Image (tube, rainbow, N blue to C red):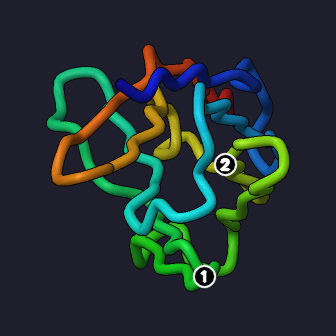
């Protein structure tokens, strides 16, 4: 079982930046399905960004050019760099890993963007 712990959330003003981290309990070197999701109050959880084992990335249209997903295999950690934050980015952000067809989630970290 993969355990995930997110950190880095907080309160930031419009236009500010945050970097979220997701530390995994085991090696992520060969895991092909890793990503970040978010859930705003009253809304369904939505996918935000994904990264493959070889480092290919893909993003939700509304965060392209502002968010960057990356990973450090040596630290078993996935990151989400968020720049030019908007109030619409306010949500609980969750790290997700899919290993052997099983989906694992972290506990989430709150991101609040104030206007």
Q: Which is nearer the eye, 112 or 108?
A: 108
Could you say which disc has been placed on residue 54 in the image? 1
Give the crowd class for mark 2: few <14, some 14-19, many >=20 residues within 10 Å: many
User: Split into 4 quadrants, where in the image is the N terminus?
Assistant: top left
User: Split into 4 quadrants, where in the image is the C terminus?
Assistant: top right
Which label's residue is closer to the chain start, 1 or 2? 1
Q: Is residue 83 toward the left or the right of residue 4 in the image? A: right
Could you say which disc has been placed on residue 78 in the image? 2
Q: Residue at x 45, y 55 (%)?
A: 35
Q: Residue at x 55, y 40 (%)?
A: 87
Provide the secondary structure element on which disc 1 rests. Answer: loop
Q: Please identify the residue farthest to the top as the structure is shown.
A: 107
Q: Residue at x 79, y 55 (%)?
A: 72
For marks 1 and 2, give the CA distance: 13 Å
Q: Which is nearer the eye, 50 or 27?
A: 27
In the rendered image, residue 83, in percent from the top left (x then y), is placed at 78, 57
Q: Residue at x 67, y 80 (%)?
A: 65
In the rendered image, residue 17, in percent from the top left (x then y), is placed at 83, 46
Quick check: 61 above or below 99?
Answer: below
Q: Is residue 61 toward the left or the right of residue 39 in the image? A: right
């Amino acid at each position: 079982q993969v355990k995930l712990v997110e950190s880095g959330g907080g309160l930031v003003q419009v236009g500010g930046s945050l970097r979220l981290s997701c530390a995994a309990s085991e090696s992520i070197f060969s895991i092909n399905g890793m990503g970040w999701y978010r859930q705003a109050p009253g809304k369904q959880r939505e996918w935000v960004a994904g990264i493959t084992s070889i480092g290919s990335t893909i993003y939700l249209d509304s965060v392209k050019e502002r968010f960057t997903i990356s990973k450090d295999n040596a630290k078993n950690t996935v990151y989400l760099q968020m720049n030019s934050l908007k109030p619409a980015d306010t949500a609980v952000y969750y790290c997700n890993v899919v290993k052997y067809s099983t989906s694992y989630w972290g506990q989430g970290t709150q991101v609040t963007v104030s206007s």
